[in-house]
Image (spheres, grey):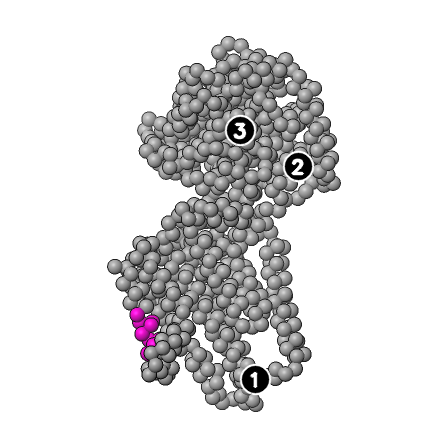
Amino acid sequence: MLAVAPFVGLLILVGLALFMQRKASLIDSSASTSLIKQSLKGLQPVALPFAALICLVCLCAAQLISVSFFELLLISFGICGIGIAQLKLPNFLSQLINAPYASSIRSNKNVIFIRCTCIRILLIASIVGCCFLTLETPYRTEPMEIFEPYLYIQTTMIALVVLTAYFVGQQRGVGPRICVWIFACIGLAQYFVWQFKGTTILPTDLFALGTAAAVAGGYTYVFNTSALIGIVWALIGNLLCTALTEVRRILLRASERPTVSKFPRAVHILAHTSCALLCFISLFLLCSIPNYTAMTGEGINYFYPIWTYQHYGSMLSFVMGVQDLSLTEPTNYSSSEAQTLLASYAETYDKTHGSTTSRQAAVEQFAGEAPSIVVVMDESFADLSIYEGMHAGYEGPHYFKTELAPSSVASGSLSVSVLGGGTCNTEFEFLTGISMAYLGAGKYPYAIYDLSETNALPKQLSSMGYETTAIHPNLASNWKRDDIYEQIGFDTFYSIESFSDAPTLHNGVTNRATYDKVIEVLNSSETPQFIFDVTMQGHSNYDVGNIPDNLKLNYEPEGISDTDSIDQLNEYLSCVQASDEDLQYLVEELSKLDKPVVLVYFGDHQPKLSATYNDLWFSDESDELHAQRTHQSIYAIWTNYTLPGQTGSSPTGSENNAFSSANYPISPNYLAAYMLESIGAPLSDYQKAQLVMKETIPAINAFGIMDSNGNWHSLDTTETSLATTFQDLSWLTWLEFTSKVA
């Protein structure tokens, strides 16, 4: 039924084209061969609208159109109208430009020149508008709403692109026409990336074009209304480019410009080339000099980048992404000296930590039977009792604090680099050992870098014979995990498709459901497993109001009268309680297994709401301490077997290990290295260096450095030992990671 609409438009367009041919005496009906040839020639001006309508008919037949009949009818008639305008264009422009004009202008040539110039300016401005609309319309989920002044900045960028192409093409319409269709293709690509992955085209996607091409055939390409309207804008832009070429032709014919002399032509070409170069340089400066992340105050929302693209414009957002890629090499950096520095730290470790009795015994134990490793990064799991019990007698997650932590190899505070979001950065720090202190708080490595050439824990454990599995009961495309997990060495990834029938709580699949998957994977093979589980149930927002009655908490902080804030706090704390209960279930299930298992459990960040209470109750303190309170999560490392140096069924830590005391602070970049050290697993030289450096800097994140006394300092501290170690770690970070993605 849908195919009727474009088919009718097609018949109207072809019929009118042939009618106008006959009326203009372009068809010789006496010769059938000539008739066919001339008919085809007469249809050339409407080739693109004709092809567009044919494609619509085919898409409808293949059921690849998701629009109403009325919408498709309007779109089809719009394309038909563009075709008709294409037929009438030459005569219309000729009459408009050459029409008699009573004025004091001395020459008719001057009149034509002025008219052509004005029409050119109007056409170029309209083409810029079409480029803008064909770029922005397809992927929109809501009416166009781009914030000022970013609307004008992006428009200027597009105008400079079009003008550059215009002058390169010597004022012909071919350059802007190419621009129109490039922007149209980008807009459609943006639409399909959004359809398939729920995200946008980011600069790092250019690093994976081969992968994209390899999987492109596995998708079904369905066009909705916005995508089709984007194509209509491209066709209008194409019509305007045809008009631009026609105006140039009329002007040249009227000017009777001599073509014998080569010098004027050379000057003409030079002038256009100079204008094109000027426009290009202006575009380059506009894209490179302003810091748009700083200008917007937030940069790209990499968790939901389509929001950024829709409110700042896709071109400007892409430029922000490109700017995020820039990294600065450490001062006086030398690759050979960095290698020497790394070897020196590794040697120091071998002579100290690596030679202890407990470490050697752990190495022998690991060589005898390597344990499976389960890592759970629990969404928004944190202990808000650090805010003076929330002034409501809150004591934090009960099981974690009273049962798990005391029986763990190590536990305590975890200094992360994010608050309220940015889960992937805590995840990145743990899996790679790289601190965000050296990349910047506003960057999201998962989203902006290709990590294929970098070292990561899954790759390391895989080389030891481990099977590596990632679990995340949400979209695989979140934070580009579908790409990143493959790049860093995970063999298997269970995303939301693996939890279609799983129970849910609050904002996602329950933690317990993911723990059942963990147990299933552990029991599936006798080979040691590395399982990394990123949970979802505790995800924000906390104003949903969907907590079951048996989990609802009702804390009332003193001095807080805002009911909504209190409700959000209790909703969050209820999620923590549910996660705490599910954690107990996991530990009990792991305890039943007849194989050694290590559990690393930590929260990725605090909820954003904690910043309100931090500002309210802790205003009179240093900036460093104030920031670190909101960036403090918790962790624990637990085993279902006894490590060397542990006693009884409730181990309290390994002897001769600086991290073994309860409540010892750490940061995610150190956590994997410490876990591997504790179980006797082989360490890389970089991990050995980390374990030496942590004696001076026990914790580090994007906002500060902790010294060995537990005091926080800014990243640019001048305290000698901290500054030296920080500089050394920056060199090793550049050597091990940054140089591979810069």
Residue 719 position within the rendered picture, expressed as x and y whole percent measured from the top left: 71, 32
Q: Is residue 423 left or right of residue 274?
A: left
Between 248 and 317, the residue placed more toward the observer is 248
Numbered label attached to residue 735: 2
Asked if disc 3 and disc 2 are in contact, CB closer than 8 Å, the reply is no
Between 180 and 214, the residue placed more toward the observer is 214
* Residue identifier under label 3: 462
As measured in the structure, the alpha-carbon distance from the residue carrying label 1 to the one carrying label 3 is 74 Å
Q: Is residue 13 magenta?
A: yes
Frontmost of labels 3 and 2 is: 3
Frontmost of labels 1 and 3 is: 3
Q: Which amino acid does label 2 sit on?
A: Leu
Q: Residue 526, can we see it?
A: yes
Q: Earlier in the sequence, mark 1 or mark 3?
A: 1
Asked if disc 1 and disc 2 are in contact, CB closer than 8 Å, the reply is no
Q: What residue type is labelled 1?
A: Ser
Mark 3 nearby-residue class (10 Å; few <14, some 14–19, many ≥20): some
Describe the element under mark 1 as helix, strand or loop: helix
Q: In this view, does 71 lie to the left or right of 612?
A: left
Mark 1 nearby-residue class (10 Å; few <14, some 14–19, many ≥20): few
Q: Which residue is drawn at 59% across and 38% down?
A: 453
* Residue identifier under label 1: 255
Numbered label attached to residue 448: none
As measured in the structure, the alpha-carbon distance from the residue carrying label 1 to the one carrying label 2 is 64 Å
Q: Residue 414, can we see it?
A: no
Q: What stretch is highlighted in magenta?
A: 11-22
| Residue 409 placement: quadrant | top right
Q: Which residue is drawn at 56% across and 53% down?
A: 319
Residue 643 position within the rendered picture, expressed as x and y whole percent measured from the top left: 54, 14
Identify the image quadrant of the C terminus: top right
Identify the image quadrant of the N terminus: bottom left
Describe the element under mark 2 as helix, strand or loop: helix
